[in-house]
């Protein structure tokens, strides 16, 4: 477990993997004959709804301390369910769009490392275009 400043030590379990969840979700939808409804558009709209429900967990609370030490067991349980809904819909969207999500996420993280070099952006919340413009070079915005 990592102990970065201000971030509670957290590790994810090794099982299930994202691939195992993707397969389970596909079987779940197939057993219920739901693939006909699981178009990319419908899944993205459902995902947006679930992100809204996740946001409601934080609505009207002000800033929350990392690790959420002041949250009740019931509040944490509700948060876990909403986070899970978001993850499951995201996996299903990626499956139905033919995107290898872990690979795409790893590629995006590498791209972001180039856009946000630690020695240049440490402690700053500016968008990369702001500091790259100051340095005289701007890359694409993706």
Image (cartoon, rainbow, N blue to C red):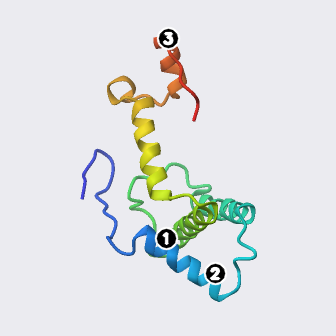
Which element carries disc 3, helix, strand or loop? Answer: loop
Say which mark, if any, is on residue 22: none
Q: Give residue 128's position: percent from left, percent from top.
A: 50, 27
Q: Dot 1, how many residues are within 10 Å of its Cα: few (below 14), some (14-19), or many (20+)?
A: few
Q: Are marks 2 and 1 in contact (CB under 8 Å)?
A: no
Identify the residue position indicated by label 1 in the image: 80
From the viewer's perspective, is the residue at label 2 or at label 1 nearer?
2
Mark 2 / mark 1, whichever is N-terminal: 2
- The answer to whether one can see residue 72 in this image is no
Identify whether 137 is placed above or below 76: above
Q: CA distance from mark 3 to mark 2?
A: 50 Å
Task: State the residue position of label 3.
Answer: 136
Asked if the residue at tag 3 contacts the one at tag 1, i.e. Cβ–Cβ closer than 8 Å, the answer is no
> For the point 51% across and 80% down, which residue is it?
24
Q: Which disc number belongs to residue 29?
A: 2
- Mark sitting earlier along the chain (1/3): 1
Mark 1 secondary-structure assignment: helix
Residue depth check, mark 1 versus mark 3: number of the one nearer the observer:
3
The structure residue drawn at horizontal position 38% and vertical position 30%, both measured from the top left corner, is: 123
Tell me the distance, in whole angstroms, between the alpha carbons under discs 1 and 3. 44 Å
Left or right: 38 in relation to 27: right
């Amino acid at each position: 477990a990592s102990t970065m400043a201000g971030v509670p030590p957290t590790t994810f379990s090794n099982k299930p993997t994202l691939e195992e969840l993707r397969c389970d979700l596909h079987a779940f939808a197939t057993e219920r004959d739901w693939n006909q409804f699981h178009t990319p558009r419908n899944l993205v709209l459902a995902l947006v709804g679930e992100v809204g429900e996740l946001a409601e967990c934080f609505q009207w609370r002000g800033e929350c301390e990392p690790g959420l030490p002041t949250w009740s067991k019931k509040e944490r349980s509700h948060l876990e369910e909403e986070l899970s809904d978001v993850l499951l819909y995201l996996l299903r969207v990626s499956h139905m769009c033919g995107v290898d999500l872990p690979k795409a996420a790893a590629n995006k993280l590498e791209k972001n490392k180039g856009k946000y070099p630690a020695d240049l952006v440490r402690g700053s919340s500016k968008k990369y275009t702001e500091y790259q413009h100051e340095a005289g070079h701007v890359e694409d915005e993706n």
